[in-house]
Amino acid sequence: MSEKELLRPAPKKKLPILEVIPHLHYLRAGKDKDRRERRPFPSLFPMTTDTQVQALEKMLSTILSDHPEYFLVEVKVRPTNNIKVFLDGDKGISIERCVAYNRQLYKMIEETGLFPADDFSLELSSPGLDEPLKLLRQYTKNIGRKVEILLNSGIKVEGMLKEVSEQSIKMEETKGKNKKQEILEHVFSFETIKSTTIQIVF
């Protein structure tokens, strides 16, 4: 061997690729584990809108359990995680009561992690007068008020809501004025009704 070959530094030994991969895999697995542990519940188990609505309805059932005079009308969840809750009462529901229920529900949603990183907004109120009646209890509490009924056939009828049963409603329609006034009585089954809205009388 020549003198130059003796002075030349020995080449660095490369680690076989199989010796490196397990180490990198271990580090990666550890990071993934930490990340998974920090994820909120919904990220691990994606929930559909229907599932979210069902979960919210269950929370509201718990909140309202001690106050049977109030009831849930509807829950809506938009793609932006905007939650709209409509509550009503047999004798109406006050703004103060809505505010109290809003705080309770908001806290429950946060504690359960129903939405990723608490990314949601909540609106809780009574249904507006322009919102169609949806429940039998709403029809019952509005007996004696003027309503507009839109039938599946497209026909609209306005009159006084007189009676409510589980299958149908009875209303009185007033036509004409003064001596020519005529009162017609109608009975509509819920199957024939597309929507019913309260009419404001001044």
Image (cartoon, rainbow, N blue to C red):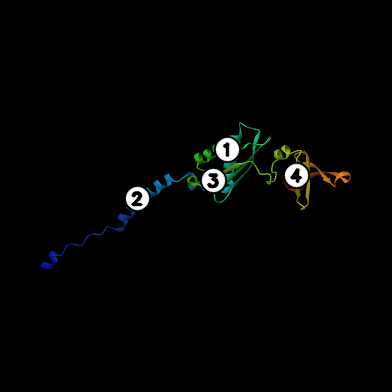
Badge number at residue 147: 4
Q: Is residue 9 left or right of residue 16?
A: left
- Closer to us: 56 or 98: 98
**How many angstroms separate mark 1 from mark 2 (CA)?**
49 Å
Q: Which of the two discs, 3 and 2, labels the residue nearer the N terminus?
A: 2
Q: Amino acid at mark 3?
A: Ser
Question: Mark 3 — residue?
Answer: 121
**How dense is the environment of label 1, judged by Cα within 10 Å: few (below 14), some, or many (20 and up)?**
few
Question: Mark 1 — residue?
Answer: 99
Coordinates of residue 142 in the picture (x, y in percent): 73, 39
Q: Is residue 23 left or right of residue 126?
A: left
Name the mark nearer the viewer: 4 or 2. Answer: 4
**How many angstroms separate mark 4 from mark 3 (CA)?**
33 Å
Badge number at residue 19: none
Coordinates of residue 80 in the picture (x, y in percent): 54, 50
- State the residue lying farthest toward the top: 66
**How many angstroms separate mark 1 from mark 3 (CA)?**
14 Å
Question: Mark 2 — residue?
Answer: 27
**How many angstroms separate mark 4 from mark 2 (CA)?**
68 Å
Coordinates of residue 137 in the picture (x, y in percent): 70, 38
Q: Which of the two discs, 1 and 2, labels the residue nearer the N terminus?
A: 2
Quadrant where the N terminus sits is bottom left
- Examine the image and state in which quarter residue 52 appears: top right
**How dense is the environment of label 3, judged by Cα within 10 Å: few (below 14), some, or many (20 and up)?**
few
Determine the secondary structure under disc 1: helix
Quadrant where the C terminus sits is top right
Determine the secondary structure under disc 4: strand
